[in-house]
Amino acid sequence: MAASKHGSEQYIKHFYTGDAVATRPNSWVIALHAGNPGTGDANEVVDGNYARQAVTFAASDQGAYWEGASAADVVFPAASAAADYTATHYTIRDGASGECLAIAALPVPIPVVEGGIISMPAGMIKVRGV
């Protein structure tokens, strides 16, 4: 069963009904977007050297909510010749199927030109829920 794009749907199914829930992914990747990704697939970066990157998470209780934050730095390859875009959003995806699991805006848009490298330090990529 493919994962739902709505985490709350899986939560309700798991805790309050007998309905089947999605299988938990075994790996995750992060994708960059040069504009609002909509439901997850719009505006993904198009660059000859661009590739989605693996990401892992560590969970912690933040008091009012739970948070999964990236456990290690994530570094994208250097942008190719003639690259000229601004990364504004990222999506977290199932590493096997590529299905979008979470969407977020970058705290500050990142302009990228030829040779530019986007590096996201551990803890920057966050997924939160109550």
Image (cartoon, rainbow, N blue to C red):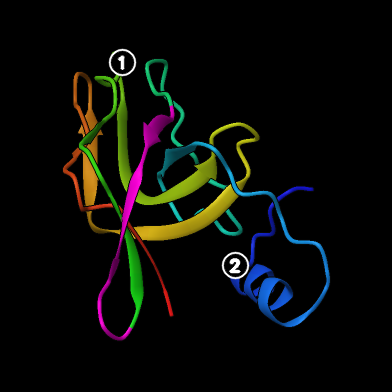
**What amino acid is at disc 1?**
Ser
Marks 1 and 2, how far apart at CA:
35 Å
Residue at image coords 79%, 79%: 17
The quadrant of the rendering that contains the C terminus is bottom left
Residue at image coords 72%, 82%: 16
**Taking 95 as reference, is 9 above or below it?**
below
Locate residue 119: give its quadrant.
Answer: top left
| Residue 9: in magenta span | no
Q: Which residue is mark 2?
A: 7
Q: How many marks?
A: 2
Locate residue 69: give its quadrant.
Answer: bottom left
The picture places residue 76, in percent across and down from the top left corner, at 29, 27
**Taking 27 as reference, is 42 above or below it?**
below
Q: What is the residue that sits farthest to the bottom in this orientation? A: 64
Q: Which residues are magenta?
A: 52-64
Residue at image coords 81%, 62%: 20
